[in-house]
Amino acid sequence: MQAQLKLTDVETYIGQYHILQGVSLEVAKGEVTVLLGRNGAGKTSTLRTIMGHNVLSKGSIEWKGTEIGGLPPYEIARKGLGYVPEDQGIFAGLTVEENMKVAMRKETPSALEKLDWTLDLFPDLKRFWKKPGGLLSGGQKQMLSIARAYVNDNVLMLIDEPSKGLAPIMVEKVMDSIMQMKEKTTIVLVEQNFMMASAVGDRFYIIDDGRTVGGGPMSVLKEDESMRKKYLGIA
């Protein structure tokens, strides 16, 4: 496996708290890599550290063989890494159309073509094109947040708990969209819903108390009941 993104013994402090204490993982091009673990294990902190929102205190973060640990978030974003935070980073006062066009930056022919493909992927956004983002349902806001990151020519997308708080039918829609998106981009996904994670993920890593404690093909975790019980609390 040739890694696009590689983390080696990553450590991060937030104030005096030692949040990440040794996270190592590799993300291959064209795959969905899922980060799993209990609440507070360090999954979101891992995404935020990759994007430069948390300061890397030790270890390395390589993107296509080049060290990016320590770079400011805007420089990391320029390299083609997009972040979809758990709190749905959209502009509530802007319409769906305005949210998407701000994310596009430039309305080039290739960008407009990708916008069309994205709207086919998220038809609800097309229906609510002129509606303010703040008036969308939770599931629609999540779709808009993912679509904003995707339309921006990002090579790698970091998506944090896209199914959290959504009705089952919306979880299925988000899951379907991620499965289609992985044909065109690489995804790192933090997800508590194991059914969704196991359906869309190619590989997994388990983070526990700020450390990577397991990883491999998703098929391994599906078959390893003891690992699921120990680190995820599920059978």
Image: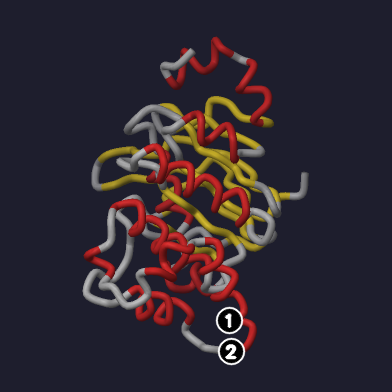
Q: CA distance from mark 2 to mark 1?
A: 5 Å
Amino acid type of the residue tagged 2 in the rendering = Thr
Disc sitting over residue 224 in the figure: none
| Image position of 183 with respect to 21: above or below | below
Amino acid type of the residue tagged 1 in the rendering = Ala
- Residue drawn at x 43%, y 42% as measured from the top left: 171
Contact between marks 2 and 1 (CB within 8 A): the answer is yes
- Residue drawn at x 52%, y 66% as measured from the top left: 150
Image position of 3 (left or right of 71): right
Q: How is the image coloured?
A: secondary structure
Single out the residue that lies furthest toward the front: 127
**Quarter occupied by the N terminus:** top right
- Residue drawn at x 44%, y 70% as measured from the top left: 126
Q: Could you say where residue 13 lies in the image, as x and y percent from the top left?
A: 33, 45
Label 2: how many Cα within 10 Å (few below 14, some 14–19, many 20+): few
Q: Could you say where residue 47 lies in the image, as x and y percent from the top left?
A: 44, 50
Image position of 30 (left or right of 174): right
Q: Could you say where residue 50 lies in the image, as x and y percent from the top left?
A: 48, 54
Q: Could you say where residue 2 lies in the image, as x and y percent from the top left?
A: 76, 49
Q: Secondary structure at mark 2?
A: loop
Label 1: how many Cα within 10 Å (few below 14, some 14–19, many 20+): some
Single out the residue that lies furthest toward the right: 1
Image-quadrant location for residue 191: top left
Query: Number of labelled discs?
Result: 2
Residue for badge 1: 111
Image-quadrant location for residue 141: bottom left
Q: Secondary structure at mark 1?
A: helix
Residue for badge 2: 108
